[in-house]
Image (cartoon, rainbow, N blue to C red):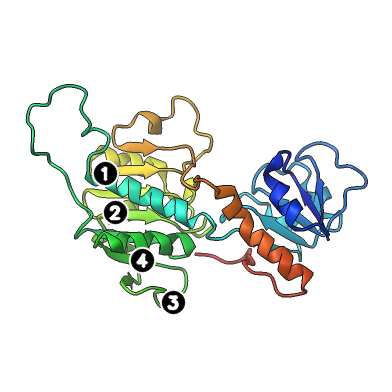
Amino acid sequence: MQVLHHMEDERLDPLIDQFEDVDFVYVPRQGDIPEDAFGDVLLTIPRDYPNLAELLDRGVDWVHVTSTGIDGFPLELLGNRVMTCSRGAGAIAISEWCLAMLLAFEKDLPSVWLDRPPERWFTADLGALYGKTLGLIGLGGIGTAVARRALAFDMSVLAIRRTAAPSPMEGVEIVSSLTELLARSDHIVVAAPATAATRHLLDADALAEAKPGAHIVNIARGDLIDQDALRAALDDGHIARASLDTVEPEPLPEGHWLYSHPQVRVSAHVSWCMPDSWHLLMAPFADNIKRRLASLPLYGIVNPDEEY
């Protein structure tokens, strides 16, 4: 087996050491592809593909994307090739990030920290996760990990999902409509895939249905939220805060209103980061290499026509 990849650093060394009979062939993301670069598999990140069409024609019949989201991949070039992704590999780090954002909102962090004597000691106007309702838009690996942690804080957890499947865990209530979820939720975590069906899922009409004072956390993709509509909802106080690890566009340009809005907390798409995060992202690919070598079906296959 030969694996074409774009990794110029040592991140693939553990895989190279693990699979001595697999050839890992580096190809540049841009520019000319070496004439002798052929492979069965393309290991890639879902963005910046100037030479993808030619690369896929170098014998590739399986593409693995090192993320959960595949929205940056030009699916029209995929053809009949199999695509897999590292679905759910970032669930631990991302779910912890979500709970950190929820706690920061309720506990008024970091504003509660002191740099001078306060007007009063021993009391503060702080909230709690206990007794609050969390609404999950999406209940895949990440959404389920967020739910598990929220339940440990004695939150009520609602979720809406693409399929009619029952809840994968006790304590999570599946609701039938986005309107119901928004109306009942104190905190809303966006964890759905980016597809044509989910673009601007949270638009002006949807945000108007949200519970007054709700807090929105987006760790999915920026285009699931209509940011102009979000700005209006923040300005009039209907939405209390937006904690956004994903925005549109990325990178966010200097001077963008999201940087300076007092009710926005924006971060640089880092919720997936933790020690060994790259190892976790590569683990599904390593498992699938073993399955491919054993002629077994691959896990984590992406259906490009699947919608939320």
The Cα atoms of the two marked residues, 4 and 2, are separated by 12 Å
Q: Which residue is mark 3?
A: 164
Circle 1 Cα neighbour tier, 10 Å, few/some/many (<14 / 14–19 / ≥20): many
State the residue position of label 1: 105
The location of residue 299, given as percent across then percent down, is 64, 69
Q: How many marks?
A: 4
**Dot 4: element:** strand
Q: Is residue 127 left or right of residue 21?
A: left
- Locate residue 71, reporting x and y percent: 59, 53
Task: Answer with left or right where residue 160 lies relative to residue 279.
Answer: left
What is the three-letter code of the residue carrying label 1?
Answer: Phe
Residue ranking furthest to the right: 35
Residue that carries the numbered disc 4 in the rendered image: 159
Which residue is the site of mark 2? 187
Looking at the rendered structure, the secondary structure element under dot 2 is strand
- The residue that appears at 37% across and 54% down in the rendered structure is 189
Residue at 52%, 46% in the rendered image: 275
